[in-house]
Image (cartoon, helix red, strand yellow):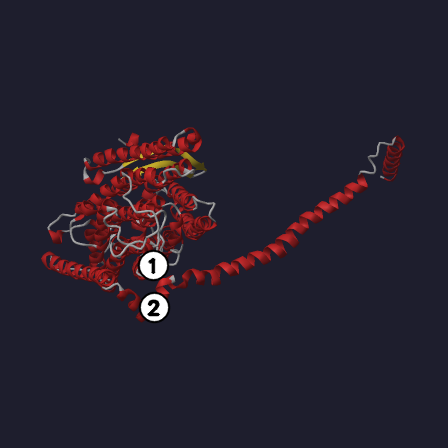
């Protein structure tokens, strides 16, 4: 089975090449079918390999394939090598499965766009890079995929580059991610210096027994975490993600649900052995994660752009995932990554359906009353908001509460993290139902525009399938407290590091406590939903009254705490001034001056020397005579 592993990445690469090189000769429909067929091929191979993996004994679930030596330099040998184990199996299925639905949806959403062939080529390249990242058996190949998804995000966020604001959004994503990527590069250098290899599996095997100071592992993991904060939009490098909404909505769905932003969580989970050896880093990861989750949620509650609400929701949910891996609940973090891909993909595609119906309108203040006009979009998005809120029985409930339980019970008891997580869950329920009620209920405020209508079946079918996954996708992780065996956790357990658990109570006592905590979080979520219903359905005037009463707090949230403005004032403008001064003084005066001066000097010397080469025979004879005289003098006095 390992011989077919390369096909997972080959299919989207071929799709990229066909659309990129031959797209001008393909019709719009053919281009979409090529791109979607390529991702379907990856999904089918991934599913086949997963079934073969499950059939193996628990300790032998691994397929590897080395295609060729990529960078052989002295003792350093970096192959193009793939690794398919339980963790990469989950990731490839999420990337290719959700990615396939987004590709199909794009056929309808991008219909008649003049750049649609370029769009599908970039979408396939994006998927190829993400699949290379999650299958990589060494850090260099992982970094290639890591940088590749960064490049593709730039290309797709700024897809409509004729609009300067959209082009700048793509540049912002690219530049901010370079900051984090520098940390990843330095981490790789330190690891190679100590272990003499960049193979992920070899480093994981050697690290626990290595005679290295804990400070080394802390430094390396902190540098990796810096890279993760960039890709997965955590404080302080989250600012690119809200602006990424400038791209087409299916791109937003792909970035937020299946590809780029999950890369940071995957990086930590894949290197969980290294992180488990650095308790200080783990605490920082958990702290940054829960702080980001709460912080982004407080911004989402006041935004009016439907995609911006979902963007800050993604940042918040990623914070949950980092909280999980930070407290050592690595499988819970990956579990939430998977369920989040289902309901966040659904929510973004649902938002795209609304935007498509509203002729590009994204302001929820100009929507309302769409329920009867878009029934499929309405009901599927209801499932999405229920899932992300964590309503019992839906996928988000199982993964969210596993994270909260992990935060409460893992490693020295992070009960304060659990408390902030519960508060964030309540805020999530509020702002998601705020989005839902303002979009589909209330009085219509879209008079004068084209009458809204349901999207075509090529767009609604992916919504239905993602709604199904948002309901049932969490049942692979039912915890023991609810009578399940959590097969998802047991499937991932062999490839993730273990981390000490604080709780020493008997299992039945632990289960009762876990059930109690589930009940508390569910009641908080229900409170958030009820308050959203009261404010936006029963008494809409309460929204304005509440904004006035909150005053400064509301303005801070609405203006995203002015972080972009602070970054602009403290970082961007000073660096721009430094660059301007450096250019005007050093580059122009020194560098250009030296180059131009040397050119002028050569020109003057050549002006003198060229007079010798004037074509007059008597001048040449005189020069020869002088040469002979100098030679005779030299010989005489030697």
Residue 555 position, x and y percent, is: 36, 66
Using the image, tell me which numbered label, if any, was put on residue 147. Answer: none
> Which of 430/297 is in front?
430
Quarter the N terminus occupies: top left
Residue 321 screen position, x and y as percent: 28, 53
| Within-10-Å neighbours for mark 1: few <14, some 14–19, many 20+ | many
Label 2: which secondary element: helix
Q: Position of residue 460 (x, y in %)?
A: 26, 41
* Residue 603 vertical placement versus 317 (above, below): above
- Quadrant for residue 90, please give it: top left
Q: Nearer the viewer, residue 206 or 191?
A: 191
* First of labels 1, 2 by sequence position: 1
Q: CA distance from mark 1 to mark 2?
A: 13 Å
Q: Residue at coordinates 62% horizontally, 53% vertically from top-left?
A: 587
The residue singled out by tag 1 in the image is 303
Question: Mark 2 — residue?
Answer: 553
- Tell me if residue 517 comes above or below residue 46 in the rendering: below
Residue 496: percent from the left, percent from the top?
Answer: 26, 47
């Amino acid at each position: 089975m390992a011989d077919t592993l390369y096909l997972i990445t080959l299919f989207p690469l071929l799709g990229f090449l066909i659309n990129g090189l031959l797209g001008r000769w393909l019709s719009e429909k053919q281009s979409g079918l090529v791109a979607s067929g390529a991702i379907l091929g990856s999904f089918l191979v991934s599913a086949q390999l997963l079934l073969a993996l499950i059939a193996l004994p628990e300790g032998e679930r691994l397929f590897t394939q080395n295609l060729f030596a990529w960078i052989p330099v002295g003792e350093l040998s970096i192959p193009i090598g793939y690794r398919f184990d339980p963790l990469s199996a989950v990731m490839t299925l999420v990337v290719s499965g959700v990615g396939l639905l987004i590709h199909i949806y794009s056929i309808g959403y991008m219909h008649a766009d003049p750049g649609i062939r370029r769009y599908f080529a970039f979408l396939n390249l994006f998927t190829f890079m993400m699949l290379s990242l999650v299958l990589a058996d060494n850090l260099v190949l992982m970094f290639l995929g890591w940088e590749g998804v960064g490049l593709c995000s730039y290309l797709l966020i700024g897809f409509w580059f004729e609009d300067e604001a959209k082009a700048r959004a793509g540049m912002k994503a690219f530049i901010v991610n370079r900051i984090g990527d520098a940390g990843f590069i330095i981490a790789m250098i330190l690891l190679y210096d100590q272990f003499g290899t960049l193979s992920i599996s070899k480093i994981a095997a050697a690290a626990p027994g290595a005679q290295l100071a804990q400070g080394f592992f802390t430094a390396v993991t902190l540098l990796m975490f810096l890279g993760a904060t960039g890709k997965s939009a955590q404080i302080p490098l989250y600012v690119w993600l809200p602006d990424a909404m400038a791209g087409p909505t299916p791109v937003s769905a792909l970035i937020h649900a299946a590809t780029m932003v999950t890369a940071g969580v995957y990086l930590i989970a894949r290197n969980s052995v290294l992180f488990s050896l650095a308790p200080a880093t783990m605490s920082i990861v958990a702290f940054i994660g829960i702080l980001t989750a709460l912080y982004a949620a407080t911004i989402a509650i006041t935004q009016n752009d439907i995609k911006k609400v979902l963007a800050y929701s993604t940042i918040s949910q990623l914070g949950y995932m980092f909280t999980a891996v930070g407290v050592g609940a690595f499988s819970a973090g990956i579990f939430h990554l998977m369920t989040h891909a289902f309901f966040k993909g659904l929510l973004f595609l649902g938002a795209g359906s609304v935007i498509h119906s509203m002729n590009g309108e994204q302001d929820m203040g100009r929507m309302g009353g769409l329920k009867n006009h878009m029934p499929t979009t309405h009901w599927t998005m209801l499932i999405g908001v229920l899932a992300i809120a964590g309503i019992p029985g839906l996928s988000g409930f199982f993964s969210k509460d596993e994270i909260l339980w992990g935060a409460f019970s893992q490693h020295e008891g992070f009960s304060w993290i659990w408390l902030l997580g519960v508060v964030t869950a309540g805020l999530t329920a509020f702002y998601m139902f705020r989005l839902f009620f303002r979009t589909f209920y209330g009085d219509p405020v879209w008079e004068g525009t084209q009458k809204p209508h349901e999207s075509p079946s090529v767009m609604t079918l992916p919504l239905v399938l993602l709604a199904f996954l948002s309901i049932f996708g969490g049942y692979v992780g039912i915890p023991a407290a609810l009578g399940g065996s959590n097969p998802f956790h047991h499937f991932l357990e062999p490839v993730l590091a273990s981390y000490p658990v604080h709780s020493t109570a008997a299992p039945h006592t632990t289960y009762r406590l876990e059930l109690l905590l589930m009940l508390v979080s569910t009641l908080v979520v229900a409170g958030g939903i009820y308050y959203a219903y009261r404010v936006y359905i029963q008494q809409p005037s309460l929204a304005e009254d509440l904004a006035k009463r909150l005053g400064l707090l509301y303005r801070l949230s609405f203006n995203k705490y002015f972080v972009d403005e602070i970054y602009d004032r403290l970082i961007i403008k000073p660096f721009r001034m430094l660059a301007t001064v450096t250019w005007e003084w050093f580059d122009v005066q020194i560098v250009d001056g030296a180059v131009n001066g040397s050119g002028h000097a050569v020109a003057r010397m050549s002006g003198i020397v060229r007079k010798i080469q004037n074509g007059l025979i008597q001048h040449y004879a005189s020069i020869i005579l002088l040469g002979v005289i100098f030679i005779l003098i030299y010989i005489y006095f030697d």
